[in-house]
Image (tube, coloured by chain):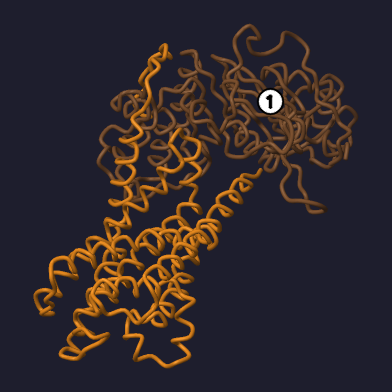
Chain colours: A orange, B brown
Amino acid sequence: MSIRTTIPPDVTRQAARPSTFRVYVTEARQEFLKLIRLPIFAATTVALPLMFYVIFGSTFAGQRAGGVGVTTYMLATYGAFGVIGAALFGFGISVAVERGQGWIKLKRVSPMPPLAYFVAKVIASASVAAVIIALMFALGASIGGVRMPPTQWVALGCTLVTGALPFSAMGLAFGYVVGPNSAPAVLNLAWLPMAFASGLWIPISELPDFVHSIAGFLPPYHFVQLALGTIGASEGGSPAMHLAVLFAFTAGFLAVAAWGFRRDEGRTYG
Amino acid sequence: MTTTQSSTTVPGPAPGRPDLPVLAELRCASKTYGKGGSAVAAVRGLDLAVRPSELLAVLGPNGAGKSTAIGMLTGLTAPTSGAALLFGQDPRSIAARQRIGVMLQASGVPETLRVRELLTAFRGYYANPLPVGTVIAAAGLGGLENRLFGALSGGQQRRVLFGIALCGNPELLFFDEPTTGMDPEIRRTLWATLRDLAGSGRGVVLTTHYLEEADALADRVVVLDGGRIIADGTPSAIKSLVPGRRITARTCVPVAEAQQWPEVRSASREGPWLTLLVNTPEPVLGTLLSRDPQVSGLTITETSLEEAFLTLTDRTESAA
């Protein structure tokens, strides 16, 4: 406020409306910028699944899993790992942090359509997911030697990127339940064992029986089975069943997030 | 604190301009947090109206209900009973929020966004935003447009939040403790800007615990304590609620002794300076001069708003 400028007197308002579409575009763009400007996010969320794909793909090169070559199989499993990670961390941690710092509150007193905040975050994490999948497909097609008909590439890619939706809901629920400081630790603690038990790291057929029995209760398992289904490598269970389970989980996570959103209303005090 | 004390009616003309339309109001609004035995009433039966061109300061100690009152007016929190209205509507309606600007206490902003991007986003929410150049100039953000929020100093970050509050060219502005942590020079510039805003016909509501700020700025002061309004009036009317004078003098008389004198309400010392709050100054001056003929630098002033405030809130405490 070093320069004092007279703010023009309040003018008669035209009955104009702000462009809702433009608000959504700006919000989504800024959510994406916020994510990629954090080098640690880019490094862990984008680089880690790519690195795992290359390491495990080359370790088991030449072997087969689910009836397809292992580098093809792992496009689905590490692709799912990357997409879920982007959604959980891009969404969950940012919601937890922004709740803690009061950013959401500042948005709530503005006339921003409340949905814009959440839709923008879904678009941003889906965009990060698309970047991960594009890079992983490039690695698979080049050094992984993956050969598939174009329809399978498209089907697998679309299924994987769409997975950002249910796991954004999961991230949102985490973001509303977990405190800002503990969010990264709690998410890692929940996510890494879940990824393992869902067969995202090692093909589920290679895992002990008891892990197998847990997997059915974990949303990533159903997601990765859907993705594997597009390349004919599914373990079993109909796609409709996997979809239904994912929908049910999504509804549950959204309910938890809505509860947290309402609970926050009572947090202004003093 | 019990509910026995009543709000103090200020004599003289009613503050504000009753002929002007009400921009925002609380009608017997109460807010209780928690349920059952652990329920805490943050505010109780608040009645408050804000009109155009009015600079209203809400004063009160921590926990008095200032932020809750602002929260109800801006739709962050719904009253448990009673009503909060913003331009006659639910404060949560987007249409009502089109017409306000808010600067909250300690808002964190994502550190990886640039100043210009933040202003662009917020301007985008409004039908008739101020030109970005006007916002940047009014908030003193010239030259900082392309800096990341996280790379700014604390004072610069507060200015960005101030700019965000101006983005929509609002008719009514809320500032929750706006000058906390600002250096005195910047604070005075902000005061001038706040006065400009009220001078241009806008309503301005600010909470503060700096009494000099309320005294210097506000047309009207509402004192909250224990979730209730204990006084409502112009700064001078509030001060006149507490009769008496302040005597300051350079003297060796100990505080403990001065406190025993009749007519003395309180005594304090800062270095060589003794300050007495008294009901009537004349008898006290007699005692002081006879006790210490060496007394120097003697001044008698009206009580400050701070002293009035302390006396008022004290009264509430002792009514408990």
Q: Residue at x 43, y 61 (%)?
A: A93
| Picture coordinates of residue B30, whole percent (x, y) | 74, 35
Residue B241 figure quarter: top right
Give residue B162's position: percent from left, percent from top: 43, 33
Answer few, some or many: residues within 10 Å of disc 1's Cα (few below 14, many 20 plus, some between 14 and 19): many
- Compared with B9, A123 (above or below) is below
Can residue B307 be spotted in the picture?
A: no
Q: Name the residue at the top extreme.
A: B19
Instruction: Determine whether A47 is above or below B11 in the image.
Output: below
Secondary structure beneath label 1: strand
Q: Name the spot of residue B140 as percent of width and height, x first.
A: 34, 30
Residue B281 occupies which quadrant of the picture? top right
Q: Quadrant of the C terminus of chain A?
A: top right
Instruction: Let me know if residue B313 appears in the view.
Output: yes
Q: Amino acid at mark 1?
A: Val
Q: Kindly identify which residue carries mark 1.
A: B222
Name the one closer to the observer, B242 or B299: B242
Image location (x, y in percent) of residue A43 = 26, 68
Q: Is residue A196 left or right of residue B8?
A: left
Residue A3 picture quarter = top left
Q: Chain of mark 1?
A: B
Query: B65 or B191: which is nearer to us?
Result: B65
Name the quadrant of the N terminus of chain A.
top left
The residue at the point 86 percent across, 36 percent down is: B3
Q: How many marks?
A: 1
B289 and A86: which is toward the camera: A86
Residue B277 in the image: above or below residue A34: above
User: Which residue is drawn at the image coordinates 15% and 75% (left, top)?
Assistant: A140
- Answer left or right for B266 relative to A235: right
